[in-house]
């Protein structure tokens, strides 16, 4: 069936053609638009730093399953509150906020209950460390009262809070959730004496969404345990330890009355225990979707079936010759897989379900060259909340009414970011010195005349196990609005291009990951696209580390560096990860073990800065639990000890690792812009 673009009706025409629909839409528009007008009046001509440093006005717009309520995160006084209200009448919206902490996410689990994910800071006096704790509550959409099902003391001493396992569509009163817990216990030592200790385990719980009561279904001392259930809430698959295999494997049963047996698959002609990570299933748990490694180490989505306790009939459902395809799309109504998702230059959605595929095709025809994300839908699939974004268009939310055949914008995440403020983003590919192909993105400031070579901001991403794309990026667009070309290479070690490409970054901090950036900059210079004498590096987290290493290792190339929350001392960072999270496998593979102190120092900016190091501007949040602000403090002190007076550090009060505060973002942009102007001014 040929895709047909959906006609975008104006609000005036809707008013005359669909009175009932328009009353529904007008309520929705009124809810979401009122704040826009207030903010527009409050700042008639905001500065570029204020515009691009604004947090999105709205996030995660979602419609309830029956289509009677809508909920969204809305920015209020610099942080997010959860707003929900009826679409049936003009009653006042309910607003839920946290005095301390942040609301991060939510989802509808019934027509009047929202599962809400939050983070709160916690200072542990015993080891004098600041932690970010995840917490989960159930919000009554009508009364605006929050239930805390996991408030018992045995659940609260963990960084990771409870998480949803299954919405259980066939039982509207309950959901399934998993959580870490601990309780007093005893262990037997080699001398056979009992010793009091605390036992940590992971449990699966049935949660009553109306009163918050929980009932343990299964609890396991293996904290890696996982469970999968059908739509009736019956657990048919679980991931737990097998004593013979000496590893965690999947166990399966056909129905809730049967015992679990190991799930196996045929490998090299023999039955082997099945232990792969399951990304999703069908509604009946008879088909599983997993990510397997294909050519070049690239991930591909494979569907397998379960027959008499065996995994059979593997079939590739999506793969790509360049990119990892490693994520699935879950239908929020049935909890079953309906498609796959991966990132090329922008997000790509491929639906396996014919109805979803047709809706996606229609919407992509309506919004060409944009990413279209189906965020939320009603049970009857008649109304869908859609998010649309592109390099030149910040995220805009639309309501698509399939019965009416109409689509209308209901909210703009960045209402002050207008198209004329945005600069075009293009792919720029090159080869590293050793021949490795690298993808990158070059943003050329709007109004740049042919033949001009603007100053350059090198903007490496964080992670380093992450990647950049061509989609809207507030930081990229701010620097471009100031007249700078902005370059974002996906250097080796970046995700999305297969395990071989990602693993090529292991033990290359300050090595080939760094030279990949230099090679990309040189390719731009050779192409005559940027001014070779006006280049600075800007980055956050690992990107901040890379920016600092740029001015340290290539001071003749980079005139200055701006770093937010950078890693500056690899040895100290290793110890922080060990003490805070326990698992150091990634760090051992990436930078070496804790016994390689000399190696760490040789690649740590804090030990490499000198009196001649080009100017450095540092920012850090004092509530950062990922990269502690002491990393920047130590670097700043060492700059001063070296006699370097060009370094400056600003600590943001109350800020975390992600620039979650609007005031911090705007200050970061404004002062970074002034710093760049001083050293490589675009004028």
Image (cartoon, grey):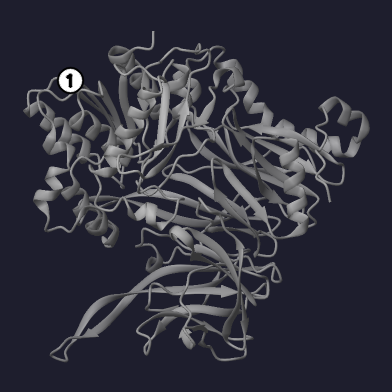
Judge left or right: residue 81 versus residue 442: right
Q: How many marks?
A: 1
Task: Confirm whether residue 668 shows in the render.
Answer: no
Read off the residue under disc 1: 646
Residue 448, horizontal then vertical, whole percent: 50, 13
On the image, the x and y values in percent for residue 457 come to: 36, 24
Q: How far across and how far down the image is residue 610, in percent?
A: 10, 28
Question: Residue at 42% of width from left, 26% of height from top?
Answer: 486
Observer-nearest of 80 and 93: 80
Position in image of residue 292 (x %, y %): 50, 66
- Answer with the quarter of the image where residue 541 lies: top left
In this orientation, which residue lies closer to the viewer: 451 or 353? Answer: 451
Eyeballing the image, is 607 above or below 360? above
- Residue in the picture at 53% in, 61% down: 300
Above or below — where is 115 with respect to 199? above
* Residue occupying image coordinates x 75% and y 39%: 365
Q: Is residue 411 above or below residue 175?
A: above
Indicate left or right for 130 with 268 as reference.
left
């Amino acid at each position: 069936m040929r895709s047909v673009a959906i006609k975008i009706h104006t609000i005036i025409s809707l008013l005359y053609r669909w009175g009932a629909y328009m009353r529904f839409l007008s309520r929705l528009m009124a809810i979401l638009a009122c704040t826009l007008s207030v903010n527009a009046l409050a700042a008639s001509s905001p500065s570029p730093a204020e515009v691009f440093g604004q947090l999105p006005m709205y996030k995660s717009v979602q419609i309830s399953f029956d289509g009677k309520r809508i909920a969204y995160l809305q920015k209020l006084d610099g942080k997010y509150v959860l707003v929900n209200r009826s679409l049936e009448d003009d009653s006042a919206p309910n607003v839920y906020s946290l005095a301390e902490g942040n609301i991060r996410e939510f989802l509808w689990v019934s027509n009047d209950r929202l599962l809400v994910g939050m983070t709160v800071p916690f200072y542990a006096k015993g080891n004098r460390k600041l932690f970010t704790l995840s917490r989960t509550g159930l919000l009554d959409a009508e009364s605006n009262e929050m239930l805390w099902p996991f408030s018992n003391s045995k659940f609260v001493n963990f960084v990771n809070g409870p998480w949803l396992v299954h919405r259980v569509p066939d039982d509207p009163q309950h959901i399934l959730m998993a959580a870490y817990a601990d309780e007093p216990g005893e262990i037997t030592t080699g001398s056979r004496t009992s010793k009091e200790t605390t036992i940590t385990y992971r449990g699966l719980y049935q949660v009553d969404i109306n009163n918050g009561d929980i009932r343990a279904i299964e609890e396991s001392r293996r904290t890696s345990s996982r469970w999968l259930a059908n739509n009736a809430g019956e657990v048919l698959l679980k991931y737990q330890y097998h004593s013979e295999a000496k590893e965690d494997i999947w166990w399966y049963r056909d129905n809730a009355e049967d015992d679990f047996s190991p799930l196996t698959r045929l490998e090299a002609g023999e039955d082997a225990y099945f232990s792969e990570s399951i990304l999703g299933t069908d509604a009946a748990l008879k088909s599983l979707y997993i990510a397997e490694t294909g050519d070049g180490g690239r991930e591909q989505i494979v569907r397998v079936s379960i027959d008499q306790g065996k995994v059979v009939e593997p079939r590739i459902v999506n793969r790509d010759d360049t990119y990892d395809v490693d994520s699935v799309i879950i239908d929020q109504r049935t909890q079953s897989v309906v498609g796959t998702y991966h990132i090329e230059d922008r997000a790509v959605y491929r639906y396996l379900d014919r109805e979803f595929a047709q809706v996606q095709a229609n919407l992509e025809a309506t919004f060409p060259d944009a990413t279209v994300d189906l965020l939320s839908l009603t049970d009857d699939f008649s109304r869908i909340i859609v998010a649309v974004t592109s390099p030149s268009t910040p995220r805009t939310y639309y309501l698509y009414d399939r019965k009416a055949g109409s689509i209308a914008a209901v909210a703009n995440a960045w209402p002050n970011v207008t198209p004329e403020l945005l600069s075009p983003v293009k792919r720029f590919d090159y080869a590293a010195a050793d021949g490795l192909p690298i993808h990158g993105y070059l943003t050329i400031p709007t109004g740049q005349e042919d033949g001009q070579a603007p100053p350059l901001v090198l903007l490496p991403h964080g992670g380093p196990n992450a990647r950049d794309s061509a989609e809207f990026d507030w930081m990229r667009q701010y620097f471009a609005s100031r007249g700078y070309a902005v370059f974002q290479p996906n250097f080796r070690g970046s995700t999305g291009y297969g395990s071989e490409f990602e693993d090529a970054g292991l033990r290359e901090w300050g090595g080939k990951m760094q030279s990949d950036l230099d090679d990309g900059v040189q390719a731009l210079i050779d192409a005559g696209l940027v001014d070779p004498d006006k280049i600075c590096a800007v980055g956050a987290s690992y990107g901040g580390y890379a920016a600092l290493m740029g001015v340290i290792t290539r001071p003749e190339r980079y005139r200055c560096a701006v770093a937010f929350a950078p890693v500056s001392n690899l040895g100290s960072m290793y110890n922080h990860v060990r003490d805070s999270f326990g698992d150091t496998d990634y760090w051992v593979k990436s930078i070496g073990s804790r016994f390689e102190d000399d190696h760490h120092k040789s690649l740590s900016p804090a030990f490499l800065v000198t009196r001649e190091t080009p100017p450095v501007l540092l920012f850090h949040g004092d509530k950062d639990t990922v990269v502690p602000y002491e990393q920047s403090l130590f670097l700043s002190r060492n700059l001063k000890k070296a006699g370097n007076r060009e370094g400056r550090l600003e600590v943001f009060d109350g800020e975390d690792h992600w620039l979650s505060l609007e005031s911090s973002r705007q200050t970061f942009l404004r002062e970074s812009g002034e710093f760049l102007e001083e050293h490589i001014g675009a004028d």
